[in-house]
Image (tube, rainbow, N blue to C red):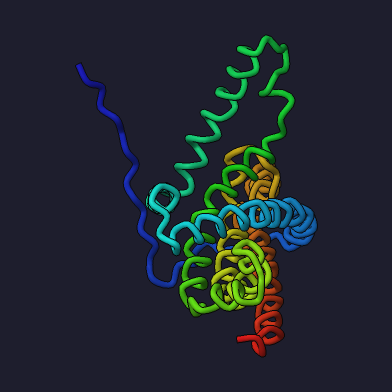
């Protein structure tokens, strides 16, 4: 037999009746802003390491695709399609769940007592995952840049007595970086914002610090406003730096 549940009638606000006002805790926002700003170092380190580690791999993938290498080009094309076709949050959840377990299994199989779960900082898992994601994005940026460079550059390098590797290093790569700079700027800004998902791996970045600070007094609006401002400042600075770099290298186009 079902027990009737008494639901109180919904009271509608009459016209002219004073409603609740949103009041922000400015003292909390000021203190939290300083805490959140400290998390910017982790965010920038995660972004920089991911870009530095991903760039050489992405350039090699781009060269393989541009040159039409049968095996390497196919692998690079499949990799880029796979990474770009899956949500970043899903990549994080899958890899962060599987990677430590696989590493621990390999360590145990080797007869070591090394505990992967306790010894490896989650920050490095985040670097690994964001690097894998950034490789796919930079590959397309470098491929577009390489296609914009005349094919005669390789022949000119051979005439000058340079090997193919030296031609790519001293002739093709500098020009490709100039052409790809706007795309790299866009990828960097998106990567900074994308690292906000690192809190899923218990990394104390900007977003994680904001969420932790808000959880004590349920000041989520104030904390998220602080996070919003910090991300806006960082992304604006990065865009200004890349804009200055584009103006500086514009003469080499």
Q: Which of 200 and 228 is in front in this view?
A: 200
Residue sitting at 72 percent across and 34 percent down?
A: 121
Can I make out residue 245 in this image?
Answer: yes
* Left or right, 63 with reference to 8: right
Q: Which of 83 and 141 is in front in this view?
A: 141
Can I make out residue 239 in this image?
Answer: no
Quadrant of image for the N terminus: top left
- Residue placed farthest to the top in the image? 111
> Residue 223's image quarter?
bottom right
* Left or right, 12 with reference to 47: left
Give how far across and how far down residue 212 sits, in percent.
Answer: 68, 43
Give how far across and how far down residue 57 sits, in percent.
Answer: 58, 52
Give how far across and how far down residue 77 sits, in percent.
Answer: 40, 53
Q: Is 41 placed above or below 198 here?
A: below
Q: Is 37 placed above or below 174 here?
A: above
Q: Which of 64 and 1 is in front in this view?
A: 64
């Amino acid at each position: 037999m079902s027990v009737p549940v008494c639901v109180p009638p919904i009271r509608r606000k009459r016209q002219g009746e004073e409603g609740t006002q949103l009041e922000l805790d400015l003292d909390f926002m000021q203190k939290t802003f300083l805490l959140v700003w400290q998390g910017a170092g982790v965010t920038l380190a995660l972004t920089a390491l991911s870009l530095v580690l991903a760039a050489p791999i992405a350039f090699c993938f781009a060269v393989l695709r541009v040159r039409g290498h049968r095996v390497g080009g196919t692998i690079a094309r499949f990799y880029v399609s796979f990474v770009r076709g899956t949500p970043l949050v899903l990549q994080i959840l899958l890899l962060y769940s599987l990677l430590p377990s696989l590493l621990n299994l390999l360590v145990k199989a080797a007869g070591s007592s090394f505990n992967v779960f306790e010894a490896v900082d989650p920050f490095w898992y985040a670097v690994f995952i964001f690097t894998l994601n950034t490789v796919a994005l930079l590959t397309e940026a470098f491929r577009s840049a390489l296609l914009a460079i005349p094919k005669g550059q390789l022949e000119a390098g051979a005439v000058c007595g340079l090997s193919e590797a030296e031609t790519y290093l001293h002739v093709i790569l500098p020009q490709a970086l100039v052409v790809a700079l706007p795309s790299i700027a866009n990828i960097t800004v998106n990567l900074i914002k994308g690292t906000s998902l690192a809190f899923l791996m218990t990394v104390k970045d900007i977003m994680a610090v904001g969420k932790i600070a808000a959880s004590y007094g349920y000041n989520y609006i104030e904390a998220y406003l602080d996070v919003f401002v910090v991300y806006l400042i960082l992304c604006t600075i990065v865009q200004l730096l890349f804009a200055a770099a584009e103006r500086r290298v514009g003469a080499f186009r």
